[in-house]
Amino acid sequence: MSRTFVKTFGIKISDFILEQVMQRAKYLLENTDMTVADIAEELGYSNDYNFSRTFKNMYSVYPAMFRRKTPL
């Protein structure tokens, strides 16, 4: 199944899932007043540090800084 997914969509399943989770994170940061820790928990991260590091790796900015640039 994994090979078929990559052939069809050109991306690994795990990368696709991570992209979807991070898109949800961006949405929550832009449209709610949930804390970064609450968002991390909502998305299944064991702690907000791991979530913040993953978010920064994907978008080159920490979630709190992203939120400051995005008015609610």
Image (cartoon, rainbow, N blue to C red):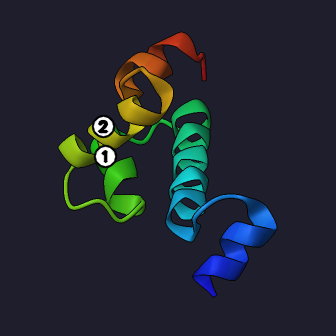
Amino acid marked by disc 2: Ser
The image position of residue 33, as x and y in percent, is 47, 36
**Residue at the (64%, 88%) spot, across then down:** 1
Asked if residue 21 lies left or right of residue 54, the reply is right
The image position of residue 65, as x and y in percent, is 40, 17
Task: Classify mark 1: residues with Cα within 10 Å, few (<14), some (14-19) or many (20+).
Answer: many
Establish if 69 lies above or below 57: above
**Residue at the (35%, 42%) spot, across then down:** 54
**Residue at the (40%, 61%) spot, across then down:** 42
Pointer 2: what residue? 52
Q: Quadrant of the C terminus?
A: top right
Amino acid marked by disc 1: Phe
Establish if 64 lies above or below 57: above
Answer with the quarter of the image where residue 55 lies. top left
* Label 1 residue SS: helix
Asked if residue 24 lies left or right of residue 49, the reply is right
Q: Are marks 2 and 1 in contact (CB under 8 Å)?
A: yes
Real-space Cα separation, disc 2 to disc 1, in angstroms:
4 Å
Q: Residue furthest right?
A: 8
Establish if 57 lies above or below 2: above
The image position of residue 29, as x and y in percent, is 51, 35
Q: Nearer the viewer, residue 37 or 49?
A: 49
Pointer 1: what residue? 51
Asked if residue 5 lies left or right of residue 32, the reply is right
Asked if residue 30 lies left or right of residue 6, the reply is left
Q: Residue furthest top?
A: 69
* Label 2 residue SS: helix
Establish if 16 lies above or below 7: above
